[in-house]
Image: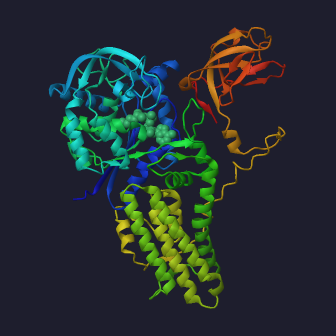
Amino acid sequence: MERDTFYVTTPIYYVTARPHLGSLYSTLLADILARWQRLRGKETFMLTGTDEHGQKVAQAAQEAGKHPKIFVDSFIDAYKRTWREYAIDYNRFIRTTDPNHVAAVQHWLRQMVAKDEIYKDAYTGWYCTPCETFVTEKDAGDVVLEGPPACPSCGRATHKISEECYFFRLSAYQDKLLAWYKEHPDFILPRERAHEVINFVKAGLKDLCISRTAIDWGIPFPGDKKHIAYVWADALNNYITAIGYAQKGKEQEFKKWWPADVHVLGKDIVRFHAIYWPAFLMATDLPLPHQLLVHGWIKINQQKMSKSLGNVVDPDVLQENYGADQVRFYLARHMAVNHDGDFSTADLERTITADLANSIGNLLNRTLTLAEQHGLREVASPPAWANAALELRDAGATMVEEFVAHMAELHIHLALASLMKFVAQVNAYFHAAQPWKIAKSDAKAFAEVIAATCESLRMVGLLLTPIMPTKMQELLGSIGVRLKEGHNTIGELEANVWNHTFVLKRGKPLFEKPEKTTESAAPATAQPPSSEQIKIDDFAKVELRVGTIQECEPVPKSDKLYKLQVNLGPLGMRQVLSGIQKYFAPDDLIGKQAVFVCNLKPRKMLGLESQGMLLVSEDADGKLQLITVGASVPDGERIR
Ligand code: MSP
């Protein structure tokens, strides 16, 4: 029987930096699914949060010279702000440092030890810190290896660890997992991802080391102070601890939401969710989640976004330039959930112009303007629709059917493709009917065209609400349609009854066409004069960050250049050359925070590479001064 609740989760993000477009994508997919189920009248719970323990976070904190808790705390507001800007309607933001999560994970570990699902032994093997994962030689391939194997997820070199460890009896779950995948062919979506997982499990599972002694930033292992919980054993459990697992008085809440309907995750973390997590749950005697929605990566020029490549897209800047709903629509329409997709601002601008401004916005605007010009403030459906309107209504019914079917498969981009095809049909109907010509001569026919267009816009507006919640509320408001909470709006749309009365109110255009920013750049040779105005986009391209100068020494054979070692927090250390010897002694600079341009192409000077540029200004006496910031700004923080 279909449940009337829906529980969806995002991965919890490692807090070593502010959220980027990739983090937004995972979160947005979960938000869209939650909003979609709400539109079907279901009570929903959406969970997101941050993964705050483990070696990766500890290392980043150390590089920033901060205690890990202070370090992770410094990013939480940025996450919450970005999610707010993008209207992410989550029910809980869990942090793995939350005391109730910590206590519940410890309870889980105690229970696992008591059930003999976990035992203590010695471990020697390879570990990938960026992925926080143990790498067996089998994972790395069949070659006989000398030296550290590369991590199969990220390709980076692993390092050897040798320590006493608590092992989870993962090997005991091989057959049970294979049986589960077989009985639940929709467990992993898209289905092609399931093959990788099944092959991996078939090749044999080893017991999994789920504690660490090399670091102390994590959940203490109950009864054994030397150990902390392995970060994935800690993090995966967030999906149950957030809704009350092992917490007094929360039994009903837990029963209400668990098992999750959908875990959204990127393709890089499938193994943890499709193998470890189900095995943990089986060992805990808890039901398994219904589905994993595995999405591809957002790439920039075919490359994965990463801090080290300096190609990370900032969702806050996109929101400021284009609007949150526009970016939400673009990501949902343009990125095929099951594939990697390339992001570009030119493409984003094209989508906003073509789909939103020209197709949807313009249709709404023309309808409302015409109605207003001819004194039509309220329009009801006629007793009988003409053939052209009936055809449009049928096309609408087909579109809703397709949309619902695609959403059931979690193929959001295909659902939107069907919807945009219908929008084109509505536009074609509107143009063919020429309401501007018949307004005076045939008021009845004119009113029918306006009514049929409003019926179509109502369908479009309701279906797009999960994608563009704010803009679609505006659209629906301008034709007098109100979204009913807790009501099965989708069921109503499937019934396809066109009998509504629309109260029309023209406002400002729904979508502005973006000014072209990417393709209008001046020829490379033409340098703009310093007083020329630039667009915010141009400024956003410059990555200014705060860093602390940790070392400073003159460059041999130069009377101008200093070689600086700069701590940029989560970005690590960078070498920056600066021609300021004349103005500062090394001691004037060491330990000082200053502002650096961080995305300049590295440049060689006197055989040394400069990986950034120090900013200075001149005071009234002609002396150079560092550009400084307030005391509370962490190293690596972006200046915008
Ligand atoms: N902390 C773990 C998840 C634990 S869940 C119990 C983690 N964190 S992460 O911050 O590295 O990644 C979180 C999610 O962001 C993953 O689903 C990952 O795939 C997604 N993305 C990170 N970069 C991405 C892109 N460039 N494109 C799309 N999503 C990608 O893994």
Seen from this angle, which residue lies furthest front? 143
Q: Position of residue 234 (x, y in %)?
A: 32, 30
Q: Position of residue 314 (x, y in %)?
A: 57, 40
Q: Position of residue 498 (x, y in %)?
A: 43, 78
Q: How many marks?
A: 0
Seen from this angle, which residue lies furthest bottom? 441
Looking at the image, in which quadrant does ligand 1 appear? top left
Please report the residue visible at 31 percent of the width from the left and 39 percent of the height from the top. Answer: 199
Asked if 382 appears above or below 312 in the picture, the reply is below
Asked if 378 appears above or below 634 in the picture, the reply is below
Occupied quadrant, residue 614: top right
Q: Position of residue 574 (x, y in %)?
A: 62, 20
Q: Nearer the viewer, residue 4 or 244?
A: 4
Would you say 2 lies left or right of 519 here?
Answer: left
Can residue 17 be seen?
yes
Occupied quadrant, residue 533: top right
Would you say 603 lies left or right of 473 here?
Answer: right
Asked if 629 appears above or below 89 in the picture, the reply is above
Please report the residue visible at 42 percent of the width from the left and 30 percent of the height from the top. Answer: 152
> What is the image's colouring?
rainbow
Q: Nearer the viewer, residue 475 or 349?
A: 349
Can residue 81 be seen?
no
Please report the residue visible at 37 percent of the width from the left and 20 percent of the height from the top. Answer: 126
Where's the N terminus, which quadrant? bottom left
Occupied quadrant, residue 278: top left
Q: Nearer the viewer, residue 328 or 604?
A: 604
Please report the residue visible at 66 percent of the width from the left and 59 percent of the height from the top. Answer: 513
Where's the C terminus, which quadrant? top right
Q: Nearer the viewer, residue 55 or 51?
A: 55
Would you say 457 lies left or right of 89 here?
Answer: right
